[in-house]
Image: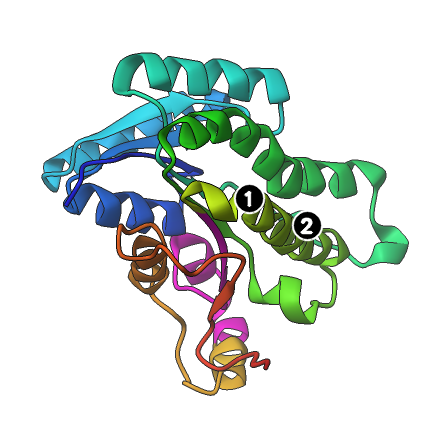
Amino acid sequence: MTKRVALVTGGNGGIGSAICAELASQGHAVVAGYFPPEKEAAEAWQKEMKDQGLEIDLAAMDVSNFADCERAVGEIAGKHGSVDILVNCAGITRDGVLKKMPEENWKAVMATNLDSAFNVTRHVLNGMLDKGWGRIVNIASVNGQRGQFGQANYSAAKAGMHGFTMAVALETAAKGITVNTVSPGYIATAMTSAMPENVLEAIVNSVPMRRMGKPEEIANAVAWLASEGNGYTTGANIPVNGGLFTSH
């Protein structure tokens, strides 16, 4: 297998960690992007990964800031070479019904969850085009496909992410680059495990498989889309949701 340079934004999060671990275990040079104010937590996470035998580099980057992404991508290229595999995984939630949603909660979610896909991809794309090879995977959500009460901002951003995927897939299809979306359902992470027991039970009961997904199941889907073997799937939205939402 060819060793590639992989950048995973939000790489130290629950799903991001599993993606980083899977790509690193395959021998890629993996860089985890993290929100700059969270440096201490990111370095502690990096040590945990190293203790598991996984060498993962860190890159401080505010994905909502175009110029900061340009800086970070340039630094990564200087250290490792240009990015071959990009996983746009950074995301936040600021839930609330629309009639009460403050403007800043709308803007924060759109900036981190959707603008970020442009901000980062824009700066890695030319390197992929120069090589004639690239893999871009955007992590969206089942709620971007079906909507979710109290998540007008999050659902809109995640739906927009797949629109971005489809357009960029068409622009790059003849250039050796694939661009795809993975839309997770409810995944067992530290964030979800902190939910009240009755809420977790209601979630599990709503999923046809009667369980939450594992971060590793998302990572496996991403790893396939990012592989040498996937040269012909592009513009797709891969659902990993236990049957919670199905579509033709």
Pointer 1 or 2: first along the chain: 1
Disc 1 secondary structure class: loop
Residue 19 on the magenta segment:
no
- In the rendered image, is residue 34 in sight? no
- In the rendered image, is residue 196 in sight? yes
Provide the residue designation for mark 1: 91
Q: Which mark is residue 45?
A: none
Verify CB contact (< 8 Å) between mark 1 and mark 2.
yes
How far across and down, in percent of the image, does residue 38 sit? 44, 26
Out of 4 and 211, give the one closest to the viewer.
Answer: 4
How far across and down, in percent of the image, does residue 168 sit? 59, 45
Question: In the rendered structure, which amino acid carries the disc numbered 1?
Answer: Gly
- At 17% from the left edge and 32% from the top edge, which residue is drawn? 55
Q: Residue furthest right?
A: 99
**Horizontal side of residue 127 vs 116, given as left or right:** left
- At 38% from the left edge and 13% from the top edge, which residue is drawn? 75
**Residue 113: quadrant of the picture:** top right
Question: Taking 72 as reference, is 183 above or below it?
Answer: below
Magenta range: 178-200
Provide the residue designation for mark 2: 157
Out of 171 and 145, give the one closest to the viewer.
Answer: 171
- At 74% from the left edge and 51% from the top edge, which residue is drawn? 153
**Horizontal side of residue 151 vs 80, given as left or right:** right
